[in-house]
Amino acid sequence: MLHGPDGGGNRIRALRRLYIGWYTISGMGAFVLRVDRDGEEPVYVQIARQLREAIGSGQLEAGSPLPSVRALASDLGVNLNTVARGYRLLEDEGFVELRDREGAVVAPPARRAPKSTREGFTAALRELAARMRQAGLSRDEIEASMRRALEGGGSGSGGS
Amino acid sequence: MEQAVLHGVAVATVALSAGFLFLYPRLARRGLLFGAYVGPERADSDDARAIAAGWYRDVTILAVVAVVLTVALAAAFPKSPASLAPSGLLGIPAFFVYLRAHRRARELACGVVAPPSVAAIGAAPVAPTRLPWIALAVAVVLGVVAFVHASIHYPSLPERIPTHFGATGQPDAWSKKSAATVFLMPVTALALGIVTSGAAVMTTKAKRALRTEQTATSAWAQSRFRNAMARFLAVVGLFTSGLLTSLTIESIDVARGARASLGWTTTLGAIALVVFTLGGAIYLAVRYGQGGARLEGSAAKAPLADGLADDRSWKLGLFYYAPDDPSFFVEHRFGLGYTINFGNRWAVAALVGYLLFMLAIVVVAFTST
């Protein structure tokens, strides 16, 4: 009789916390998708944007499976077409592969970008840099935020 | 003596129902007030307490009136079961009392923003249980066996066949042989087995409405709860089809004179089904809590899940109607288990089909005996 009834209860509670805690840690890789159905941004854009950010920051690695369209639509309570549209957008951008059997899977980065794609990104970057400069960011600040973006970290916003 | 027991049961039922109605505001989820999402803060406000006080007052009046009516009916008609009427009809005024509290809670909920819809992606996955599919296959096989057994022996059955059996398994009621009386049982075996295991299959795909904090744990707990609930339903389905199939075969064997009474397995199976159903429901409630809330270590204060907080999808605070949501089953906002999405055509069709089938069974059973 080393433990009174209370001691036993505490031990069970501690074990239970450990048990729950293990799943919390094992679920740490998980990221949380939040959808505001009344927001101005269309829901499929919200889904695509958050998945893109999670893939970009490495929270979702290449090859990791995404939930099926039906499962995600059910959990979020949105239309099947909305989720499918978000996935298709990501497929077009090369973030996601839609496979028949496994469903949607995070795609690995492409081996080599074609010339037209490169030129498009260069133009977009040039425009972004101009806007950042105009908004009052210094050259150093722009470079630092570019580096942070490449490393996958947020700059105060984004991340979960 | 028997009548006294009946009147006692009537009073006890009223007392139990009233007790449940009294407990209702305490059992409801955090942030939810009489079927309206008012948020955790407003749920503790004086306005919320005033609405609850109104509910307690109305329920007290209802309970007193129901007890007085029951006693009066028992005194006026001591030899009839009329005293059971108030307990049976208590639900109707209770529903209106609920609606009144619900309408006031809706006003209080004005301007409260429901939490956003949330899904966990990449969390440690919990594989859905396969037991419901096995139960479905077994239900089909057993149902077909029962049906074939009835078809083979139908021509050789006597004109008078037993339709009811006493506790000892001896037949105690007979009726004229007809397709309805002979095939009622195997068709019911097939249908109930398919419905129960089908519901179990859909339960493994039910909506996971995640709680606001601890999303990964919540996703895990909800998946575990879904599986537990699906296994429970699958085993109930297995029991039901096994029981009805053995009942079909044995009662046909009694009718054709191959045996004198039902075997002890049928009686034992019936008792086991009741024990398992009640015990399983209590076990699920204690071990998992609603939606797996107890696995999250927050049994006392389980908050309302995100997906269940949006009042626009909850008609009268009770019925989930979301035409965009592809979910078939969603968690009950109150109580243990799942309810259908009334905005899902398939779910509504399944419910209507099931109700029509049960009605048909009752009609056939009454007209043929």
Image (cartoon, rainbow, N blue to C red):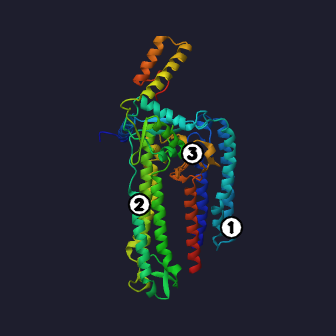
> From the viewer's perspective, is residue B234 above or below residue A145?
below
> Label 3, on which residue?
B28
Q: Quadrant of residue A116?
A: top left
Of residues B228 and A116, which is closer to you in this image?
A116
- Residue B259 tag number: none
A29 with respect to B172 (left or right): left
Q: Are the residues under badges 3 and 2 in a single subunit?
A: yes
Name the kind of residue labelled 3 in the image. Answer: Ala
Q: Kindly identify the amino acid type of the residue bearing the numbered disc 2.
A: Val
Residue A121: % across, % down: 47, 25
Query: Residue drawn at (56%, 52%), measured in percent from left and top?
Result: B341
x, y (%) of residue A83?
51, 42
The mark tally for this picture is 3
Q: Secondary structure at mark 1?
A: helix
Vertical order, B120 against B139 (above or below): above
Residue with the mark numbered 1: B73
Chain of the residue displaying label 3: B
Foreground residue among B43 and B73: B43
> In percent of the image, x 46 and y 22: which residue is there?
A122
Alpha-carbon span between mark 3 and mark 2: 29 Å
Residue B235 is marked as: 2
Above or below for A19 versus B348: above
Mark 2 and mark 1 on one chain: yes
In three-dimensional space, the C-alpha distance between marks 1 and 3, rounded to whole angstroms, equals 34 Å
On the rendered structure, is A93 left or right of A2? right
